[in-house]
Image (spheres, rainbow, N blue to C red):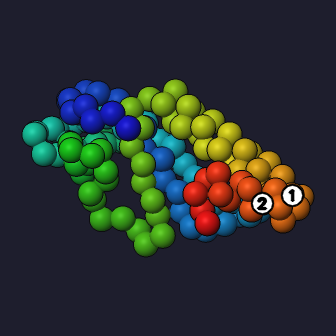
Amino acid sequence: MAKQKLVIQQRVWIESSKWVFRDGNPSVSILEHEVVRANNSSAYLVSVEDLNKESSYELRVSQSDLKVMSTSIFGTKRTVWLSLEEREAYMNSMNEKKRLRDLLHTEIDNMNLETLEELASQLNLK
């Protein structure tokens, strides 16, 4: 992820993944946020839905690594995305990595011992 500093009025997306599984998948939500305050070390984000409310909850994000620093609910992971395209590219690469890993796993399971030993020696695993 890019290490650019967040600035006031910049829009970002927060992905929240909860370890509550429904149909075998974690519960995931993505909400658009806007930076309302920022300094060298932190940026404070408010959900776009709550921008015009008199009182709204601010998420504190570290400027150095774009990690959410606000108190989180146990079992919830929050990820800051600078754009939805960035998230989509990341998800596509993870899906491709999983697909290739599954394909290689199947191929390795079907190899005979001699071929596996040769592959292990080529990879310096012996």
Q: Identify the residue shown where x is 31% and y is 53%.
A: 68
Residue at x 65% of width, y 44% of height: 97
Q: Where residue 103 sits in the image (x, y, percent)?
A: 80, 48
44 with respect to 23 (left or right)? left
Q: Is residue 53 visible?
A: no
Q: Residue at x 60, y 37 (%)?
A: 93
Q: Quadrant of the N terminus?
A: top left
Q: Circle 2 — which element?
A: helix
Q: Quadrant of residue 23?
A: bottom right
Q: Position of residue 59 (x, y in %)?
A: 29, 51
Q: How many neighbours does mark 1 have within 10 angstroms: few (below 14), some (14-19), or many (20 or more)?
A: few
Q: How many circles with numbers are drawn on the protein? A: 2
Disc 1 target residue: 111
- Quadrant (top left/top right/bottom left/bottom right) for the C terminus: bottom right
Measure the C-alpha gap from mark 1 to mark 2. Answer: 6 Å
The reply to whether discs 1 and 2 touch (Cβ–Cβ < 8 Å) is yes
